[in-house]
Amino acid sequence: MNASLSDKLLNRLTYVFLIGVSLIFLLPILWILRTSFTTKAVAYQIPPKWFVTPTLDNYRAIFSNNPFGKYFLNSMVISLVSTLIAVFLGAMAAYWIARSSKGGNFLRIAVLVTQMLPPIVMVIPIFLMVKSLGMLDKWETLIITYLSFNLPYMIWLLIGFFETIPKDLDEACEMDGCTKMRAFTKVVLPLAAPGIMAAGILSFLLAWNEFLFALVLTGTGSRTLPVAIANMETQQGVMIAELCASTVIIILPVVILSLFIQKYLVNGMTTGSIK
Amino acid sequence: MFTEKRKSFLIFFIPSMIVLAATVLYPLIYALIMSFTDSSLKRKGLGNFIGLDNYTRIFHDTHFLGSVWTTVVFTVLVVTLEFAFGFIVALMLNRIRFGKKIFFTIIIVPMLITPVAVGLIWRLLLHPDLGIVNYMLSLIGIEGNAWLGDAKLAMFSVVMIDIWHQVPFMILLLLAGLVSMPSEPYEAAKIDGAGRLQTFWMVTVPLMKETIIVAILFRAITAIKTYDLIFVLTKGGPGTTTEVISYHIYKQAYTFLDTGYASAMSYLLLLVIFVLSIVFMKVSRSQPQA
């Protein structure tokens, strides 16, 4: 009797605590969302106006006054293309590593080590190389640079996915006389498709959120969203409402995409270190 | 003629390795060479070979040593607090039956946001005059602060913001560990009449040991590399109170243009990360797979 009463109490407390925690995580984001729909004047008001009539002015403003649309496009193209290349190359390399008996372990560790590299180590030499090649501020430059973290990440994730597919399946196909490539595309790829999709989204997010390389390697031409919003603040003072709208734009694709791959998130975000 | 095996090696494996050699290996070697030169952005080429001068200079550089200390303080604070808080939330999430999925979805959101946006969100919320935080505090009679502009508070604020951003990651990892635990030891503990706290210390913690070590190490490695958040929140300031190593190296290269010296510092950072990574891999591989 006593025990079940304390159980009930503990359950209640747990829910109260979890609701509190959720609010701490959620409220700042909701406040930014709210402010992005207010007029400039209201955004500055302290004490704040709690009930506002929403307006899309800020979104219109950032896409028309600023070259924000261009930066959005830059971010989209760079993240998308580098992810596609990483998926294409990474899937093949991962398949080869997953199916090879010797050397596999060493390669796995090598791939994981690249994930640990601090970006600041890479950014100085890459900047100097890019500069001497006259390739600063170009889409291609960021696309290729992003492969330095996207490709190993992709290989690492996909090794895990391919290993869950029984070896016998593609070996049977090879027994029947098809090439390794055919076994790969006809047998393994269709089975691994959900995993590849999730890995692709994770690597897209990595590129979409990347800041340091973009900061150093781009000018106004190929600037990406993270650099653009970091600059927006320093250039124009505090333009609260528009800054909030820009922040919402940068967060939105990330949150939507992640909801699709929730069950892969744990493994993906920890580079598969915990299964 | 190539054998079938060699051909598949060439098609499947080599293209990725070429890309990685060009984008990872070559820059790493370039930085290593540069760390032994007086290379600078002020002139062309690699500069003169000066042996270990950059490395000896590092250990007399009080600014650098200051940034090392700042990084250590930052890392220890965020990892400990995130672990403690993350573990509590993970345990609670593991307890409940209803609404687990909703809580989980809400809780992971901050982790997904790019650090730049996290920095901007909190700069707006913590703005001394226009921010909502100071206003809310004033309602309950607490005087507001310049959270990020005050040398005494800046580190505290940055740590709090990092916790908001990264604790979901800790929760995710620890929850994954809790979910995959066997139920037998708990039943045994119950039969033996162990209390809640006793069960936690005698059953949960020992069983979670590897997961805990992996989570802490992994988070420590990423915390040492922190850069974006600092850049947006404080730019290392006020003064150098929040100037972590990565930001210090960035400044050395792009404000003082001293790329040779910056490379030497970055290699030292690399070494530390490398050692931690090796420990991390040893631990995470010895972990029994659930």
Image (tube, rainbow, N blue to C red):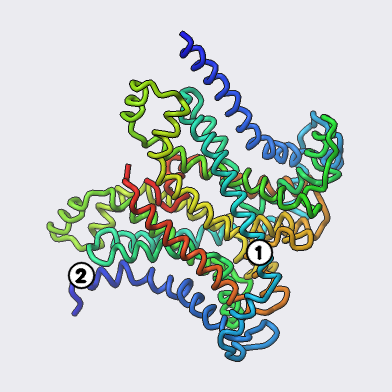
Q: Position of residue A96 (x, y in %)?
A: 28, 63
Which sits in the foreground, B188 or B124?
A: B188
- Look at 56% across and 19% down and name the residue there: A12
Q: Residue furthest top?
A: A1
Q: Position of residue B225 (x, y in %)?
A: 58, 60
- Look at 47% across and 65% down and name the residue there: B274
In screen coordinates, is B116 left or right of A266? right
**Which SS class for mark 1?**
loop
In screen coordinates, is B62 left or right of B289? right
When asked about the image quadrant of residue A87, the answer is bottom left
Badge 2: chain ID: B
- Per the image, the residue denoted by label 1 is A223
Q: Amino acid at mark 2?
A: Lys
**Which SS class for mark 2?**
helix
In screen coordinates, is A24 left or right of B29? right
Badge 1: chain ID: A
Instruction: Judge the density around disc 1: few (<14), some (14-19), many (≥20) Cα neighbours within 10 Å.
Output: many
Q: Is residue A141 visible?
A: no
Say yes or no: labels 2 and 1 on the same chain: no
Q: Amino acid at mark 1?
A: Arg
- Look at 68% across and 87% down and name the residue there: B43
Which sits in the foreground, A175 or A12?
A: A12
In this picture, is A210 found above or below A139?
Answer: above
Q: Position of residue A202 (x, y in %)?
A: 48, 51
- Per the image, the residue denoted by label 2 is B5
In this picture, is A110 found above or below A40?
Answer: below
